[in-house]
Image (cartoon, helix red, strand yellow):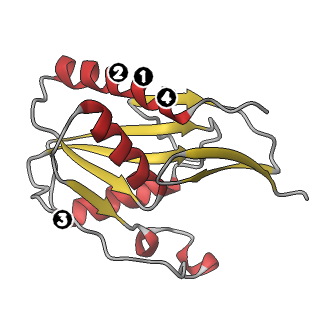
């Protein structure tokens, strides 16, 4: 399978995100990346936008509904939000939207910090395999994979690869 170029996707996403924010009248959004791939995508997106806004980071490990089944990932780090959440327009950024469970966990964590005015969801890839009714406002590309395939993003230079779990 041929995967899209992440650098090209980031450029297209920056254009779409600017248009989305302008359409909604949002002039001072706060950017938050979900660890780890979402942080890499957020950093690349902020660079493409020419923004020097601080980047918040979320590690949603403790908020996932499968935490008791999968256990704790060995590289859990605390979330860092260098701005208020209450009343802010947030841009939540992740690398791959698959089941929607990571985004649900991120929303739960964000609302523990306060009630934002709005949340715009931005994802590099949407695998269109959602278990939950969650869709990004801005997406780089939508892909369909076989049940035994997963997309892996490595960074921070943003390289995509398909992994075959059947092997």
Real-space CA distance between mark 1 and mark 3, rounded to the nearest whole angstrom: 31 Å
Judging depth in this view, the residue of 86 and 29 nearest the camera is: 29
Residue receiving disc 3: 113
- Helix or strand or loop: what does disc 3 sit on? helix
Identify the residue at horizontal 26%, vertical 18% (top origin). 19
Q: Earlier in the sequence, mark 2 or mark 3?
A: 2
Q: Earlier in the sequence, mark 4 or mark 2?
A: 4
Label at residue 9:
4
- Helix or strand or loop: what does disc 4 sit on? helix
Residue receiving disc 2: 16
**Lateral position of residue 160 relative to residue 140, left or right:** right
Real-space CA distance between mark 2 and mark 1, rounded to the nearest whole angstrom: 6 Å
Label at residue 12:
1
Real-space CA distance between mark 3 and mark 4, rounded to the nearest whole angstrom: 31 Å
- Helix or strand or loop: what does disc 1 sit on? helix
Residue 152: where, in percent of width, then height? 64, 52
Which quadrant holds the C terminus? bottom right
Real-space CA distance between mark 4 and mark 2, rounded to the nearest whole angstrom: 10 Å
Q: Quadrant of residue 41?
A: top left
Q: Earlier in the sequence, mark 1 or mark 3?
A: 1
The answer to whether the residues at label 4 and label 1 have Cβ atoms under 8 Å apart is yes
């Amino acid at each position: 399978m041929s995967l899209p170029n992440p650098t090209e996707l980031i450029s297209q996403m920056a254009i779409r995100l600017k248009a989305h924010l302008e359409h909604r009248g949002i002039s001072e959004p706060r950017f938050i990346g979900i660890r780890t791939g979402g942080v890499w995508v957020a950093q690349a997106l902020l660079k493409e936008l020419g923004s020097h806004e601080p980047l918040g980071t979320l590690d949603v490990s403790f908020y996932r509904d499968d935490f008791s089944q999968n256990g704790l990932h060995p590289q859990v780090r605390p979330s860092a939000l260098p701005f208020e959440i209450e009343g802010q327009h947030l841009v939540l950024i992740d690398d791959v939207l698959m089941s929607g469970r990571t985004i649900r966990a991120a929303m739960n964590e964000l609302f523990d910090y306060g009630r934002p005015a709005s949340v715009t969801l931005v994802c590099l890839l949407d695998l269109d395999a959602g278990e939950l009714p969650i869709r990004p406002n801005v997406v780089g590309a939508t892909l369909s994979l076989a049940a035994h395939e997963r997309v892996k993003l490595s960074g921070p230079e943003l390289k995509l690869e398909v992994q075959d779990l059947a092997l």
